[in-house]
Each structure stands twice: as C-alpha cells, then as structure tokens.
Amino acid sequence: MASNEPEHEHREDEEAAGADDEDTGAQVAPIVRLEEVAVTTGEEDEDAILDLKAKLYRFDKDGNQWKERGAGTVKLLKHKETGKVRLVMRQSKTLKICANHLVIPTMTVQEHAGNEKSCVWHAADFADGELKDEFFCIRFASIENCKTFMEKFQEVAESQKKKEENEDASNAAGLLEKLSVEDKKAEEKSKEKAEEKTKEDDVKEEKSSDNADKKDETASA
C-alpha cells in the first residue's frame, strides 16, 4: 500500500536527521593516549654502502640441501668509527634477521654454478644469536645486481685486509716506540747508577786518603 505521507515531510525528517550529525566543533579527547616510541635497529652508527633486494639460502649439511632463509633486503653496513663492515639481511615483512656477519679479509664470494644471478660464500654468522659456520647462497632479480653485490663484497674484503695490515704496522711501530722508550729509560737508569757508583768510589777514596794522612801524622809524632 502506497504511503499517503507527502514528500516534503520526508525531506524535513531527513534534514532534521542530518542536522543531528553535523559537526558541533567540540573536540573529544582520546580515551587512551599512545606515546611515540623510538625504534632502534642497531644500525644507527653505520652507513649503508650496499642495499639490494634478494633471496637468501643456507646449506643444510644434515639434509644435504639448500634451505630458504628469507627474502628481503641485504645490506653492507660500515661502522662510522671502527670502519668495520658487516653484512645484514632482514626478511621484508617480519624484519627478522636472516644473516648477520662481519666481512673479513679471508672471505671470498663466487658465482653459484650454473646461475649468473646467484653467488655463494662461507661466513661465521650470528643471525641466530650464536656464531655458526654457514654456507650461504643469495639470488638476485638480475645479473647486474648479483655482479654489483660480488664486486662490492670483494672490495670490502680487500679493504679490510689493508686496514688490518695498516693496524698491524701501527701496532708494530707503537711497540717499537715503546721498546725504544723503555730502552732509553733503562739506559738513563744505568747512567744514574754508574754516576752514583762513581760518587761512592770518590767518597771511599777520599776517606782512604784521609785515613792515610792521619796515619802519617801519627807516625811523624
């Protein structure tokens, strides 16, 4: 059955309902105030010298097969003070660390057999909270990215070798300098002892001479 109510009454009702929803300008304070929390990644003192998307695998010795560690971003991070470089990779969604190790002079990276987009290397990794000897394989979306990674990896390893050689040379120079200073101090002490002994001998000679003179005087009397 059709409604006998006029259309203008419906419009008035709708306008009245709309008026109830109008913004009154009042501000309602939130029930719970959330404070901003500073999130630290542990990378604040490091500069990223490489940042690429990739997928990481580790070789499972027990199962004799490659197992996926995660897909995400692999970085080479250089410490602002020490100059040491570490490789860090996190999974994209969870940000869980799937690789975390220093790049040291003895490391080498090489192309994975039969795949120009992948490369492999050994590392003492700390991703699980303890050092583990891992054999990694990383796969990139392009051959160019894989080559960029390998070149930068090798460049860092060689630079760390030169850094260690320079540190060894500095340490050796410091040791030699320390030894020379100690030798100089020992030489000065020896001179001081020699001078003291000479003075003691002079005093003894004077005493002996005095005693001899006294004996001569006594004999003359």
Image: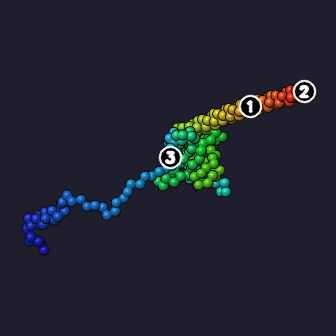
> Which residue occupies the foreground of this view, 39 or 18?
39
How crowded is the residue under tag 3: few (<14 C-alpha within 10 Å), some, or many (20+)?
few
Task: Please tell me whether mark 2 sits on a helix, a strand or a loop.
Answer: loop
Give residue 20's quadrant in the image. bottom left
Q: Which residue has dot 1 on it?
A: 192
At x 48%, y 45%, the residue is 44
Q: Nearer the viewer, mark 2 or mark 3?
A: 2
Residue 31 coordinates in the image, percent (x, y): 31, 64
Residue 221's tag is 2
Residue 83 higher or lower than 56, as above or below: above
Name the foreground residue: 161 vs 167: 167
Say which of 103 and 112 sits in front: 103
Taking 67 as reference, is 78 above or below it? above
Q: Amino acid at mark 2?
A: Ala
From the top left corner, tell me how far across and down residue 21 is, in percent. Answer: 19, 62
Q: Residue furthest right?
A: 219
**Distance (Cα) linking label 2 and label 1:** 44 Å
Label 1 sits on a secondary structure element that is: helix
